[in-house]
Image (spheres, rainbow, N blue to C red):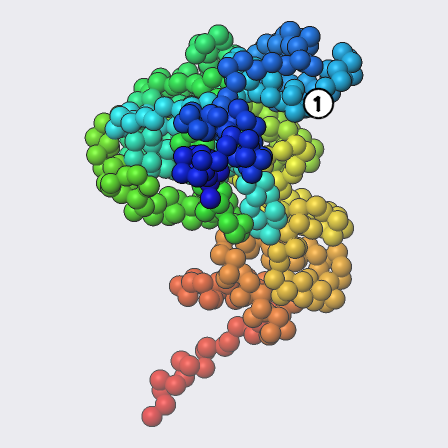
Amino acid sequence: MDQYEMIRTGYRLYSQSISELSRLTGHSRNTIKKAIRGEPWGYKERGHQSYPALDQYRAIIDNWLESDRDSPRKQRHTAHRVYNRLVEEQGYRGCESTVRRYVRMVKRILGVGSPRAFIPCDPEAGHEAEVDWGHAIAVIAGEQVRLSFFCMRSKYSGKHFVRFYPCERQQAFFDAHIHAFAFFGGIFPILIYDNLTTAVQKVLRGRDRVEQEAFSKFKAYYNFKALFCNPGSGNEKGGVEGLVGFARRNYMVPVPEAGRLEEINEKILCQCIAYGNHQMAGRERKVNQLYEEEKAYLLALADVDFSNVKVSEGRVDKYATVIVDKNRYSVPGSYAGFKVKVQLHVDRVELFTGGKRIATHERLYGNNKWNLDPDHYLDLLQHRPMAFNSARPIRQWQKSWPESLHILLERFCSSQGETKGIRDFITVLMFYRDYKPCDVNAAVELAIGNGISVSDGVRHILIYTGDTGKTIAPLSTWPSLSAPDVSAYGQLGGVQ
């Protein structure tokens, strides 16, 4: 039975005395009297909390917590740290729980480190989108790599775009925007960002920023306005912050695997499109239905995409390579010493000389990496065949050769000698310039099966199987019949 009820019942119905009720319940006589008078039962909060042991240290604690306003968020006093400092520096002898209660109260008053309330918002259709970067692991061509992924999310509809890049450089940043604008079919008038260095050169007081010159040009080209969050206030673009986690948990589990980065991007693009059929909690309509409503408010796409190409100059060195952005890219060996013009795209590098494109490579990110096209070194290796086995571009290429090429090389060296055999084998490798790899591989297998051990035999197989309209010249290394005597045919006319 509830003791409050028992006290009142015992006193009113059974005429039990206050002393008797106090003895039965264990409460003081004053408490029994309060229950009989019907006053509030239980404990009530004090109007003023006293801190006898802590009182002389309160001003010190207040000063420490006040100074935390100007300190980095992750380098502010915790209650435990305050307690330790009081013990070590001030000789405090009280308990830690008292310090914790006082610190919690002061932080709430000062607004330092205390939980904040948020305002529910109802975004305007087609008005704002949020932008952010995330990071995830993927497996590209069997190698585990750490990639960055770009996110853009509509605040109104929740429709979003996600795309992977090897880095977060400015070219990747611009390229991601261009793909996102194409995905949404328009441009949001306002885009909200963190204070990322690809867009912001300097953070000023309040919302003012000194923008990067290239970003200002990009923004002016597409006519949108950029807003930047306060430093350390990711909640100001909470929608896209949530998208980063959502994309990592849903689009990147299990860990994406592909031969090329573009294959992963194509898969994630399909998932972003499929998300349009999703209905978010608290919404009455699906994402695509909300997006169709806001699409009419977006700015029109530009007729021509922003030129996202960096142009520079370089010179071909003695290794037939050009250093571009701290990495090396090969060109045909005949251009050693030439000046070249470099066009640096986000995904590729193009090299020109005299208005002619002499090489195109997939772009490398990082430092001191080499992208060597083995075809660029074949002419040089024919003059220096003994360097063939140790040549870096060839050794890299051999890792992806079919077994038939290894067999053909051994046969050429066995039948012609090592030096001549390597030279003749390089001629076979040159066939990849004019024929499809699958056709050359098939011709090599056919040559091996028919005991052919010279490049001319492989060439004739390619010509015969590739275009029957071509005239096949006789092989100089094969024996040929002498010219026939046709004079005897004239005598046949006189035979009766």
Depth order, front residue of 492/475: 475
Residue found at x 40% / y 34%: 12
- Left of 79 or right of it: where is 246? left
Residue 342 in view in this figure: no
Depth order, front residue of 422/194: 194
- Left of 422 or right of it: where is 231? left
- Residue type at mark 1 is Cys
Q: Position of residue 436 (x, y in %)?
A: 49, 56
Residue found at x 41% / y 27%: 38
Query: Which image quadrant is residue 40 in?
Result: top left
Q: Badge 1: few (under 14), some or many (20 or more) residues near its Cα, within 10 Å?
A: few
Q: Quadrant of the C terminus?
A: bottom left
- Give the residue pinned by disc 1: 95
- How many marks do you count on the picture? 1
Residue found at x 69% / y 14%: 53
Query: Which image quadrant is residue 87 in?
Result: top right
Q: Position of residue 111 (x, y in %)?
A: 51, 15
Q: Position of residue 74 (x, y in %)?
A: 61, 22
Residue 127 in view in this figure: yes
Depth order, front residue of 123/420: 123
Q: Position of residue 463 (x, y in %)?
A: 48, 62
Residue found at x 37% / y 43%: 272
Using the image, determine if residue 66 lies above or below residue 492: above
- Left of 374 or right of it: where is 251? left
Mark 1 element type: loop
